[in-house]
Amino acid sequence: MPRGNLILSSSLAGGLLLVGIGASAAAPTQVYTFKHTAERTDPKASGRVVVRAAGTDTLETTLTLSGLTPNKAYAAHYHALGPQASADPCMTNGPVTLGFPPFKASATGRATVKVTAEASKVAGNAGAYINVHAASDLKVVPLCAALRRTSPASGSSVVTPAPTAPKAAITVSIGDHVFQPKMVTVKAGTTVTWKHQGAAVHNVVSLATPSLRSEDLEKGESYSYTFSKAGTYDYYCSYHEGMTGTIIVTD
């Protein structure tokens, strides 16, 4: 099993399905969301994949996971598209092309694991999807993230077009029991990033906009959301009463 320079991190970082991985290190940062497999093991598990350029023709892939079985050992691998025809890469039973370092969930069921490798090792068909396995039985796969799509007609790999870059970006600081600034006015297309600078665990949740919802954030972690439509978006921290904020989006 080919492997790159492996890096394991115990820290956490705060999905949108964007584009398939390209071979160029100049590719933009890409974010993918894990989904449950049909096995429904670890039913509370969730997470995301972040792929970014780490140097010339080198990519760093970071898996941020939560809701795992506390203190349980896991493994994760890149897989290529397999021989089984399916519109879902996770269902094609593809071979392993790159491995992540083995890791264990924390006492709260969270983990972050990284692998740095040549872009060519995950380009083309090599990085079609990522599976998270139970280390004790690699046939147990609680989570999968699709990085490439297959064509239902031909079964060949196709790449989703790259999205248009956001028009602007702004940062909201998360302190203990306060969002600062509490109210922000932005134009449609702006990406807002919440940066945790406090001590307690916080999150960003909107009842009216279900897609506006972060995982639990600890100090140093962040969460970003792009507001594509005009409107008023109220949000709050589900852990602390009265900790609220508002994003006003104009055309």
Image (spheres, helix red, strand yellow):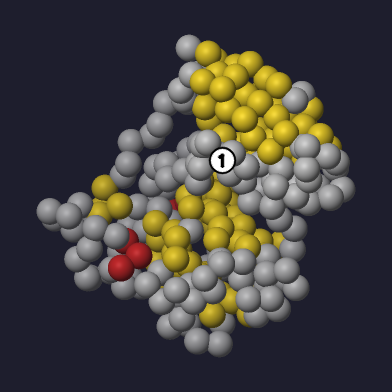
- Badge 1: how crowded within 10 Å, few (<14), some, or many (20+)? few
Seen in the image, is 167 located left or right of residue 178?
Answer: left
Element marked by disc 1 = loop
Count of labels shown?
1
Viewer-proximal residue, 196 or 32? 196
Viewer-proximal residue, 8 or 57? 8
* Residue 32 visible, this orientation: yes
Q: Residue 95 location in percent, x, y?
A: 36, 73
Viewer-proximal residue, 194 or 230? 230
As drawn, the residue found furthest toward the top would be: 251
Where 119 sits versus 249, above or below? below
* Residue 59 visible, this orientation: no
Amino acid identity at mark 1: Leu
As drawn, the residue found furthest toward the bottom would be: 136
Give the quadrant of residue 192.
Answer: top right
Seen in the image, is 181 located left or right of residue 248?
Answer: right
* Residue at 51% from the left image edge and 20% from the top image edge: 231
Q: Residue 162 location in percent, x, y?
A: 38, 34
* Residue at 48% from the left image edge and 19% from the top image edge: 230
Viewer-proximal residue, 105 or 160? 105
Where 7 sits versus 232, above or below? below
Q: Residue 123 location in percent, x, y?
A: 40, 52
Q: Residue 232 location in percent, x, y?
A: 56, 22
Residue to which mark 1 is pinned: 207
